[in-house]
Amino acid sequence: MEEFDAIAKDSGRMAALHRVGTLAKPALSPEGATSIDLGCGTGLFAKVVGAKSLVGVDFSEVLLASARERMETVLQHDIFDLPFAACSIENIVSLFVIDDYSSEKKARFFATVFSLLKPGGNFFFAAYSPRDERMGAWHGAFNRQRQESIEIYLEDVSSYRRRFQQCGLLLEQLEIIKADGVFQLGIHTLKLRREFIVMVGQKE
Ligand SMILES: C[S@@+](CC[C@H](N)C(=O)[O-])C[C@H]1O[C@@H](n2cnc3c(N)ncnc32)[C@H](O)[C@@H]1O
């Protein structure tokens, strides 16, 4: 957990998690509301927002082992094959998860989010902007240095705005969060400009 969390802190990503936390807190507080974090990782968001009742979902057992310390309930599941009934969830959070997936899978994910939400339910979403230097211009250099071939499919604000519209979510909030991130690339320490897209939608 320490390594994943330390990377998140140095990376500047915490600025977005804190902002989403501020936006989401009033919706996550009411007793009895079912709220899920899709792709929760180590449960950093639950820690930031102080919501142990948030249900964490991730396919990585290693990360969930840490998330268990921050959330009362965690489920090892693929976000494309979820065990929840339609219209059963008050709040869905998903931060920096869908960037890894193609346009087709993104569309499937947004349709799933819409179908799971109760009418009046909220979707709290964050993604990397194409202007984010770590995941944009520098992504290839990190892949080469680490001898990885991790694919990433960044989309801009207008594209995500369209996705909200197409699946039927009413856009309530859209913000660009900027931060500085510090990364180690081989022997080089890089300071990169970060840019995150934060959106809040509601199912009418
Ligand atoms: C960049 S991390 C973000 C973690 C967390 N949301 C945060 O902001 O700290 C992406 C997370 O999504 C999870 N993930 C990616 N694809 C997934 C899938 N298909 N099903 C479940 N979890 C997935 C990964 O295991 C990882 O924990």
Image (cartoon, rainbow, N blue to C red):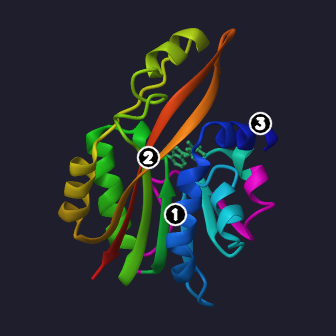
First to last magenta residue range: 65-87
- For residue 68: magenta? yes
- Label 2, on which residue? 196
Mark 3 in CB contact with mark 2 (< 8 angstroms): no
Disc number at residue 164? none
Above or below for 167 versus 195: below
Residue at (27, 41) in percent of width and height: 103
Mark before the other along the chain sequence, 3 or 2: 3
Q: In this view, does 59 lie to the left or right of 159?
A: right
Mark before the other along the chain sequence, 3 or 1: 3
Number of numbered discs overlaid on the protein picture: 3
Residue count near mark 1 (Cα–Cα under 10 Å), binned few <14, some 14–19, many ≥20: many
- Label 3, on which residue? 3
Which quarter of the rendered picture does the N terminus lie within? top right
Residue at (45, 56) in percent of width and height: 81
Residue at (64, 60) in percent of width and height: 75
Q: In this view, does 79 lie to the left or right of 46?
A: left
**Alpha carbon separation for disc pair 3 and 1:** 22 Å
Question: Is any atom of residue 39 visible in this view?
Answer: no
**Alpha carbon separation for disc pair 2 and 1:** 11 Å
Q: Does the residue labelled 1 lie within 8 Å of ligand 1?
A: no
Q: Where is residue 2 in the image (x, y as percent from the top left)?
A: 81, 42
* Amino acid bearing label 3: Glu
Residue count near mark 2 (Cα–Cα under 10 Å), binned few <14, some 14–19, many ≥20: many
* Amino acid bearing label 1: Val
Q: Is residue 67 left or right of residue 59?
A: right
Q: Say which of marks 3 and 1 sits in front.
A: 1
- For residue 159: magenta? no
Q: Is mark 2 within 8 Å of ligand 1?
A: no
**Alpha carbon separation for disc pair 3 and 2:** 22 Å
- Label 1, on which residue? 20
